[in-house]
Amino acid sequence: MIDNPFSLEGKTILVTGASSGIGRATAIACSNMGARVIATARNEERLQATIAQLNDAIDGHMMLCADLTSPEELDGLVKSLPALDGAVFSAGNSVTLPLQFGSRDKFDEMLNVNFYAPVELLRLLYKKKVLNKGASVVLLASIGGTHSFMPGNGIYGASKAALNSVMKYAAREFASRKVRVNSICPGMVDTPLIHRGTITEEQLAEDAKRYPLGRYGQPKDIANGAIYLLSDASSWLTGHDLVIDGGFSI
């Protein structure tokens, strides 16, 4: 028998934002590595499409629809969860807007989705002991606001930098229960978020040339990083922001 430290067999993993993009790819990858997946997102139809792609050889996958920015729905989600061995927080949003147009409401909107909601979920999972001893939590941050500071990215970058900072404090505080907390800081990833018309397809193609490896990331590139952080292969790693950016930050 081959020992595979990256296996998630026997683990129950929560994935937020599982209805598309990185969240969907992560949910599928976790199930393929043997995990029971608890998938959550707001859109029931898209979430069902994710569930349909999970490894059906694993029993007990669950779909829980919830808007994490709603205190009532977030609380209901936490109460519905089984004990967890891991969680990946990939729900989020982005905006491209110069700071001169970054009014308070624009910051509030971004922080509610990218910072307050995942931090509150993390707090509740730990406080209510939903996370098993030895569990691993992975937060999706970004190189934006942590390693890269491009014009027009200030609002989004601020929300992700704040999330990355809380990750490190949580890692220190949760270590007493052997709960690990890390983040992934991706570069630009080819998900539906970047094809909303804010930036033209021509601009995206030109921007991708700036990456040393010559392309944007794919959701699976980030999902594979999450597998590592969830698995026993990273059992001595906490408080770390894993940069996966095709070399952009160098």
Image (spheres, rainbow, N blue to C red):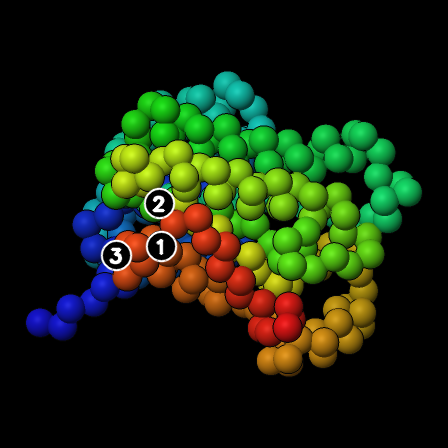
Q: Residue at x 25, y 56 (%)?
A: 232
Label 2, label 1: how far apart the Cα atoms are: 7 Å
Spot occupied by residue 223 in the image (x, y as percentages of width and height): 44, 60
Name the image quarter holding the C terminus.
Answer: bottom right
Question: Please, what is the three-letter code of the amino acid marked with disc 3?
Answer: Asp
158 on left or right of 138:
right
Residue that label 1 marks: 237
Residue 180's disc is 2
41 on left or right of 246:
left
Q: Is residue 98 visible?
A: yes
Asked whether disc 2 touches disc 1, contact meaning CB atoms under 8 Å apart, the reply is yes
Name the image quarter holding the N terminus.
Answer: bottom left
Q: Earlier in the sequence, mark 2 or mark 3?
A: 2
Residue that label 3 marks: 232
Q: Nearer the viewer, residue 105 or 192?
A: 105
Q: Nearer the viewer, residue 23 or 187?
A: 187
Image: 83 above or below 155: above
Question: Please, what is the three-letter code of the amino acid marked with disc 2?
Answer: Arg
